[in-house]
Image (spheres, rainbow, N blue to C red):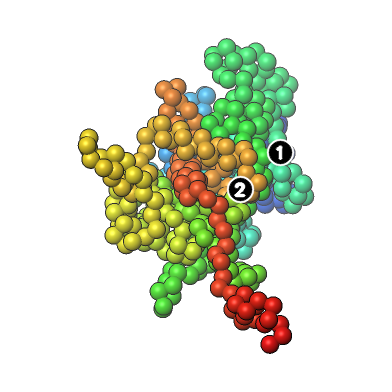
Amino acid sequence: MVLDEDAMVEVTIPYNFRPRSYQLPFLQAMDGGYNRAVCIWHRRSGKDKSFLNFMARKMWERVGSYYYFLPTAVQGRKIIWDGIDRDGFRFMDHFPEQLRRKTRDDEMKVTMKNGSIFQVIGTDNVDSIMGTNPIGCVFSEYSLQNPQAWDFIRPILLENEGWAVFNFTPRGRNHAYMLKTMAEHNPAWFYSLLTVDQTKRENGKPLLGPDDIQAERDAGMDEALVQQEYYCSFDALLDACFFGPSLARHKSAMPGKMGTLTRDQAGVPVFAENGKGNMELWRYPYCLLPTWDGIRWKKRYVIGSDISEGLRQDYSVAYVYDRVKHEMVARARTNTIDTVAWSKILIMLSEYYENALIVPERNGAGITVCKTLSDANANVYANEIPAKVGSGLTKVIGWQESQQAKYDICGDLKEYFHSTQGAVFDALLLSECSVFIKTETGRLEADEGFHDDCVIAAALALQGHYWLGTKPEKEEQPITGWRARIQREGESAWTA
């Protein structure tokens, strides 16, 4: 019970919410001392209503900032801020008006009278959570989120003894699957997986019975989607996305080092490690490793770059591909700088990775990047195409997108996932691939509300690898010393 001092009435928190029996183990576990939880509950099980009301109660137990994360801000507004349940009750009405001090619709933010703050945030814009200090977070539909958000938040919650809850239905074996596997075997985490066979109403009847599921099938729901959404299968829907089962074998995703490329006083690119950088690095250039033998490689690295059409919209992304290890070893990603600044990042990235070939997208804003790279004499991909009739060939810098070209490069990326012996470290890339679909009209694109910038950038990096053709080889080193003398003088050198 909470007292509204202005109206001198008591308000029960949670407000207008009574948990179902299968939701109680989660609530009891969190009250019993858990501060981390993974809940993989089927569609229509009341996930967001449960965790929203749990958060509302926690906001009165401890004053602080509380964030409700969804994959995108658009989804956050649609599902939580403007969401309405099947009975016509607005989700946000679980925060009673008489207990609010201020509501900001533009920021999807509520300040309660006790000082606690609730906000809905999309993890597609990770920069928006920089410098914040939440003490409670829900990551809703985490399987579709940018996993970097959790990497930023986790040290904060560790320091302030805050809590985090992850809810989702499966979407392939991506970062959420790895979190599920960890939580399932970690006694410090509460773990719950509920299919339609495990959820019942108070009268003992199934929340959703066989007739309900069959009605979904009869209405056109694909069986793979039924298995994913109602039976929590992590593999069922892989056939429905463009990259399909080729994603299932990649379980080595792991965070890299976050940081920023800068230039030292001599103008040489250096990687400065920091949690707020726009670059994630899994492998340093071979020549910076202590095990380097001093011999350089020819054409070992290549960079593919998708380029944003505008700030705060899609992302500009670049992947560095190691042609020896067959791995994406670094990624730069941002939606807060213009094309000129992005060109400078690509140039530094190329210099840092041994003058790597840059394969930039040429569409829209990419034209500016291509010109900037050309003017800077960067090592940039160029293709020769026929000019006007009767003329010779014209050199065109960058990759021009068309639906057929997109099919070609994404098909190559699909084959890479299927056959590579290298590791796929980037959970964000795997996540984007899991929502990359072929639409009813035959177009390849990200599912509604998601991004495919990482997909295109990684695919372009592979195109650079194929375009270079020959396998990378170590450069021949000049022969010096006694070896050079033997080569010059033959056996007589031994007796001289």
Residue nearest the viewer, comparing 133 with 139:
139
Give neighbour class at mark 2: few <14, some 14-19, many 20+ (Cα, 10 Å).
many
Relative to 116, is 485 on the left or the right?
right
The answer to whether residue 485 of the structure is visible from this angle is: yes
Q: Residue at image x 38%, y 54%?
A: 380
For discs 2 and 1, the disc positioned in front in the rendered view: 2
Q: Residue 294: which quarter of the image?
A: bottom right
Q: CA distance from mark 2 to mark 1?
A: 28 Å
Return the residue nearer the eye: 134 or 310. Answer: 310
Of label 2 and label 1, which has the lower sequence position? 1
Category of crowding for the residue at label 1, using alpha-carbon neighbours closer than 10 angstroms: few (below 14), some (14–19), many (at least 20): some
Answer with left or right where residue 268 lies relative to residue 140: left
- Mark 2 lies on a secondary structure that is loop
Residue under label 1, please give it. 192
Tell me where residue 134 appears, x and y as whole percent: 54, 56
The answer to whether residue 48 is seen in the rendering is: no
Camera-side residue of 204 and 171:
171
Amino acid type, mark 2: Val
Residue extending furthest toward the bottom: 496
- What number is the disc on residue 163? none
**Residue located beneath label 2 in the image:** 424
Hey, what amino acid is under mark 1? Ser
Question: CB atoms at circles 2 and 1 under 8 Å apart?
Answer: no
From the viewer's perspective, is 136 left or right of 182? left
Mark 1 lies on a secondary structure that is: strand
Position of residue 130 measured from the top left corner of the image (x, y, whole percent) = 47, 59
Q: Position of residue 471 (x, y in %)?
A: 56, 52
Which quadrant of the view contains residue 106? top left
Picture residue at 62% right of the left edge, 38% below the top = 418
Up the image or down, 59 lies above or below 389; here it is below
**Residue at (54% x, 45% y) in the render:** 429
443 to 121, vertically: above or below:
above
